[in-house]
Image (spheres, rainbow, N blue to C red):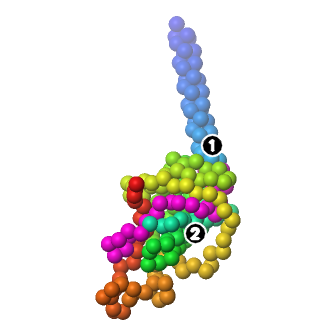
């Protein structure tokens, strides 16, 4: 009877080993699949996109809505799902024409994380649809989310922009004396990019 018990224990150990190996192979397959999906997303994302991100800027107690946004995603050739780029929001009824930022971005398990270099802020893009021509979904920032819709366009030349808000103090399109009763010694708060549900 002891002999049969030892054979039974051996079979149980062999089954446990087999199940453990199958579970490990399944986990490895899932992680490799995620990397491949992230790389495919990054590959499709690379390029310039134009449309409405429903971005606003807050400045001096007022909100200004961007007319449209233009985002360029440049894929880093040394990594599979990240890169840098540019994000420019254009305004028609604000004291400035545009707000331009360099961005660093990455795709991680399908979520697109965007970091605004000049502002030091981050946003996430989730629940989206992406193909070679159209990019739409939801952008998240500090608990607020809005939908967006972008279309793929040609790549413009971005070296003519003044990046961030710091350069505004010395340029013609940002003047400390635009407001009524504001003199040249008054410190003016710079606009801050936000997303808000204006619907």
Q: What's the residue at 43%, 53% (across, down)? A: 145
| Image location of residue 28, percent across then percent down | 60, 40
Q: Secondary structure at mark 2?
A: strand
Task: Judge from the rendering whether residue 89 lies leftward or rightward of residue 57; answer left or right.
Answer: right
Q: Quadrant of residue 76?
A: bottom right
Tell me if label 2 and label 1 are in contact, CB under 8 Å. Answer: no
Q: Secondary structure at mark 1?
A: helix
The residue beneath circle 2 is: 86
| Image location of residue 149, percent across then percent down | 55, 55
Q: What's the residue at 65%, 59% (across, down)? A: 152
Q: CA distance from mark 2 to mark 1?
A: 29 Å
Q: What's the residue at 61%, 61% (across, down)? A: 49
Toward the viewer: 20 or 181? 181
User: Eyeballing the image, is 193 above or below 27?
Assistant: below
Within-10-Å neighbours for mark 1: few <14, some 14–19, many 20+: few
Q: What's the residue at 47%, 60% (across, down)? A: 54
| Image location of residue 11, percent across then percent down | 57, 18
Residue most extreme to the left: 181
Magenta span covers which residues?
Answer: 38-64
Residue most extreme to the top: 1
Toward the viewer: 43 or 72? 72
């Amino acid at each position: 009877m002891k002999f049969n018990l030892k054979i039974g224990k051996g079979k149980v150990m062999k089954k446990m080993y087999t199940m453990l190996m199958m579970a490990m192979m399944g986990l490895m397959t899932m992680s490799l699949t995620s990397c491949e999906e992230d790389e495919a997303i990054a590959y499709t994302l690379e390029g310039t996109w134009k449309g409405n991100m429903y971005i606003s800027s807050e400045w001096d107690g007022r909100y200004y809505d961007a007319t449209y946004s233009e985002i360029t995603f440049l894929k880093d050739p040394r990594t599979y799902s990240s890169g840098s780029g540019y994000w420019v929001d254009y305004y028609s009824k604000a004291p400035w024409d545009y707000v331009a930022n360099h961005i660093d971005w990455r795709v991680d398990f399908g979520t697109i994380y965007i970091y605004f270099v000049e502002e030091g802020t981050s946003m996430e893009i989730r629940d989206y649809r992406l193909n070679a021509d159209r990019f739409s979904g939801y952008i998240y920032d500090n608990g607020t989310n809005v939908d967006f819709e972008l279309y793929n366009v040609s790549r413009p030349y971005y070296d003519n922009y003044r990046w961030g808000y710091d350069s505004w103090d010395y340029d013609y399109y940002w003047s400390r004396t635009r407001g009524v009763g504001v003199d040249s010694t008054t410190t003016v708060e710079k606009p801050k990019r936000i997303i808000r549900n204006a619907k």
